[in-house]
Amino acid sequence: MLFRQTAAEFLKLWRVPAFSATSLLLPVVFYAFIGIGQASQRLQGTHVTFGAYFLASMAVYAVANVMIFSFGISVANERGMKMDLLMRATPLPPLAYLLSKCITAVVFAALTLAVLFPFAYVAGGVRLDGSEWFTLAYRVLLGSIPFIALGFAIGYLAGPNSAIAVINLIYLPTAFASGLFFPKQLLPQIIQNISPYLPLYRFGQLGWDAIGAPTSDNVTTDWLYLAGYGVAFFAVAVWAYRREESRKFS
Amino acid sequence: MTMPPAAELIDATKKYGDVEALKGVTIRIELGEVVAMLGPNGAGKTTSISLLLGLRKPTSGNVSLFGLQPTDLRARSRVGVMLQESGVPAMLKVREIVDLFRSYYPKPLPRDEAIAIAGLEEKADALVRELSGGQRQRLYFALAVCGDPDVLFLDEPTVGMDVEGRRSFIERIADFARRGRTVVLTTHYLEEADQLAKRVIVIDRGLVIADAPPAEIKSKVAGKRVRFNAPAFKEMDLEGLPATAVTIKDHGVQLLTNQPESVLRELFRRGVDISDLEVSGADLEDAFIAMTSH
């Protein structure tokens, strides 16, 4: 049952090119435009290349993108189609439904990394230790959990037609403000003052640290920040879910 | 120990804010029954089904499925459902989504059988979004039967279909019922109820106003609406005639009856001067007016 549900969830997303193509290819395209040109340059005072640094940025961008979009859009769509009503009347346990969406998102996120990593290796000449590749991969997967909760919250709060717009409005600007596209030092001072409090910035720090780039805090602080955001987003998601429940199913 | 009924509402009420959708409904459906719930829009049919499926909670009263809470997964795994306007993922193929729903149930029908029951064999490899409206309804039917349920709940299954589509769809439902399954369906159409069900429950404004075999319901329901102009017509002119819901406005007279021929013959015999005569089939709204005015 869980396997079938997960396979179906995966196919549902896979067959929407607006989602599957953009989440798999966009990070690579960004990497080609921004990362490759100066891939071999070293970050000031370190042995870390810009190619590796930008790989970490795009890995974070890609995985958080999958989490927010896949949940936000699929939940909002299913609510819009009233599919949730029919699912509710079936013997599928709600937890299995939720779990299948999580597994699907993680598989998708892993796929984006499976495209991005080799691309950075070949086109960006990025050479990392085996442990660095591994640390980067598991940190971006684990650190994306708060964004799952955020995706759910948006999925329950936004309408099916507005979900994509809402997510883009939130996600793209904060990705820029968090220094995922340009190093934080190049951003306006006011944004630089805000960025340490953005979840994506903390997520980015985990990625940059994984490949040996200098960051502004130690990793534990970053994890704690992310955990805090995770709890907050989860609380909003639960509240939004309950609100929906009391409207539709009481 | 007696078998618990397949589905039961006991004195159930349901309020949406200030609106009282159900005002104390008691319905007991035994295993193997084929029951039609008949009523106009907003009568409370969908609310009754929602309560029986545990999709909504009653404001007061009791609900059970197989003697269990309707939200109990053991009860749900014996139930197949077709809801009004519920969507399914557009990007899955028919056979994929049938397989998906089969996986929810302990002893599902074979995939091809479920698809054949719904008459979708030719569309098995089509994406859901490529289906026409009628094919989509049949897909919902396939999803409802694919778990080989003991009880099938169908909320207005033929809505939006043309006459031919409705007739053949009702035939498919009847085929499934002949397997000895319980079927509960809601409908606007008395003829559907008549074609399919052994028992008709008429719901109007949140109350059960009749619960009887279709023939009995039909005899209560006035089948024809008669309209004509007659100057100086008085209600007394109809005395002793099988007509109900009589309205007289200016010279226009309207009434409902099961025997328009004998009513008219008698009116002519009584010398009533009739012009602009019009006899038409009564719709359900008329039928309810007739039933409630008894």
Image: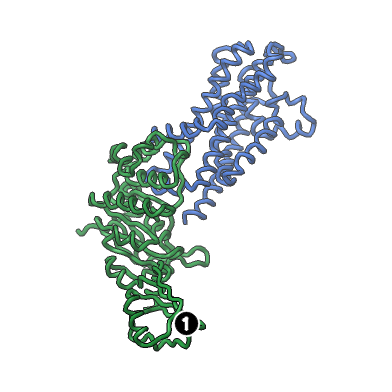
Q: Position of residue B208 (x, y in %)?
A: 36, 69
Residue linked to disc 1: B248
Front one among A112 and A234: A112
Which residue ends up furthest to the left in the rendered image? B1
- Residue lying at 48% horizontally and 31% vertically, measured from the top left: A104
Q: Which chain is blue?
A: A
Q: Position of residue B183 (x, y in %)?
A: 30, 54
Mark 1: few, some, or many residues within 10 Å (few <14, many ≥20)?
some
- Residue lying at 32% horizontally and 73% vertically, measured from the top left: B220
Above or below residue B235? Residue A36 is above
Front one among B260 and B126: B260
Q: Quadrant of residue B257?
A: bottom left
- Residue lying at 34% horizontally and 48% vertically, measured from the top left: B80
Q: Is residue A2 visible?
A: no
- Residue lying at 73% horizontally and 26% vertically, measured from the top left: A184
Mark 1 lies on a secondary structure that is: strand
Q: Position of residue A162 (x, y in %)?
A: 61, 43
